[in-house]
Image: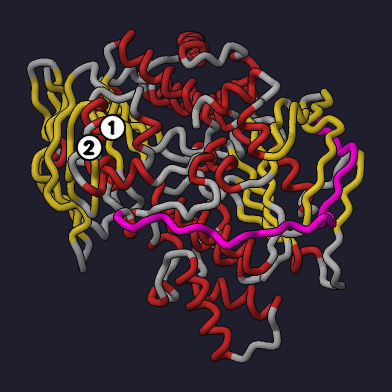
Amino acid sequence: MRLLDVSELKVASKHETLVKGISFHINRSEIVSIVGESGSGKSLSCLSILNLLPKSLTVSGRVEFHDEEVTNSLLNMNAQLRAQFALKKIAYIFQEPLSALNPVQQCGKQLLENIYLCGFKGQDAKKRAKELLLMVELVDTDKVMNAYPFELSGGQRQRVMIAMALAGNPDLIIADEPTTALDVLLQDEILGLIKKLTKEHGKSVLFVSHDLDAVRKFSDRILVMYKGEIIETGTAEQIIKFPKEIYTKALLACKPNPDKKGHKLLTIGDFNEAPTVFQEHIESEANIVNTHLLHKEYFKNGRIFRALKSISFNVKKGQSVGLIGESGSGKSTISKLLVQLEEQSGGSIEFDFENNKPLSSNVQMIFQDPFSALNPLIRVGEMLKEVIHLHQPQLNSKEVEDEIKLLLTKVGLSAGDINKYPSDFSGGQRQRICIARALAVKPKLLICDESTSALDLSVQAQILNLLKELQIQEGLSILMITHSMAVAAWFCSYLIVLKDGYIIEQGLTDKLIKSPSSDYTKAMIAHI
């Protein structure tokens, strides 16, 4: 029995049609995934269902929700009726919980606000809040209710978002990249949780992802989008095992793995070409970073929380080191200590850059969340110009402009993007801007904190290829912080596996992949 029918849906700006008359349906108790590159129209299509798009875009077509014996035409509803309808019928889980949750309000208060809107009051509302948290497997309900978003791990924040979405017991859940920033083990947990809720409570799910491989075990049907159109649809098995379109085949081939190590990753544009080999790269025996017995403590709610527990590792000059672990393992804490955003509680960090430049001129960090890393009021060109003027003051205006154009081209954008604002770009494109800004400094050490986790596989391949080329050509040292063992195994020559603030094992990539010593590492390798 059908729950949602979308017919000839179009989304257009003043200058172009972004979604070009797509049609699809969702049955009751069915999970449908929309997969495609950044900018293909996936999120626009989903936002159109509840007309959550900015006023600068126009929507046409039909979106019909079948509520028992009544069919509701969502595009023709006024805003007030649509908001009331959506509260109990359609829930939306956004891509970034850090952006979607209010950072200065406790999670419990935000959850209760949704529950109050659904008609619950007093003790009944608090009881409902705890029921929802238990439903999403957050068993320490009091701790979660009293916590602020930044005090929870990525997986916990995403579970809070799912609990908020379930407050009105909706029939349809729209999940827009809810596992993008999660490690593979947590990704499986969240996808498994959503599937469990779907089957046990009769929910339907419209799931948005850029990763075909991530949704293969999760989806009943998959829709492949490309440039605003649905180019292929079928069951998960049909799409994964027997793809018809070249684009779908290319999406599946873009994913990195150890077998492709030393070869450039294929992207959508060069799918039919033979993969090329990177030139030979010899690492120095000298270290650019030495850390010894590093530990970090935080004081939370009257307790001491040990985020890092006496860890030691080195990064050689020209080396790529992968720091892998689940959310909350301490990976990002290490990156903050290395760039002196925070001070270690004990241990030592020593750098050897062979120059007298300040730390910020030698070490640059590409942050995980491109939405909060970019100033929404500054144009891309001005943003890059400011960095170049600060770190390369010898360049004249023409040279600065040429450098900006070169940087944008390197990360897959165009010179015409100079005058655009961050809001003019998709999530993946914003991350490319962040990478360009870091490269503008010409650093010796680049720290990539989940810098490709928000990118579709083709763009991820392009950025990883770029970073590898920069490492080889300029002798750049790279600390790749990632939750993807596949990315780390392809990119890095040395791996460090982190869990609960401890290094549980480390070693040369080839050796560690073939002979892992811990069950945790084995579980991560199983997802490659």
Amino acid residing under circle 1: Ile
Q: Secondary structure at mark 1?
A: helix
Residue 523 image point, x, y percent: 57, 22
Q: At x 24% / y 33%, what residue is drawn?
A: 239
Residue 400 falls inside the magenta stretch:
no
Point out the image quarter for the N terminus: top left
Along the line of sight, the residue nearer the viewer: 80 or 257: 257
Q: Is residue 278 magenta?
A: yes
Name the residue that disc number 1 marks: 240
Q: Which mark is residue 321?
A: none
Residue 243's disc number: 2
User: Residue 480: image x %, image y %?
Assistant: 64, 47
Q: Which residues are magenta?
A: 272-299
Left-right relation of 366 to 128: right
Q: Is residue 219 above or below residue 493?
A: above
Residue at screen point 54% across, 42% down: 487
* Mark 2: amino acid: Pro
Find out whether the residues at labels 2 and 1 contact each other: C-beta distance under 8 Å.
yes
Q: Quadrant of residue 397?
A: bottom right
Q: Is residue 170 left or right of residue 340?
A: left
* Residue 204 picture location, percent across and down: 26, 21
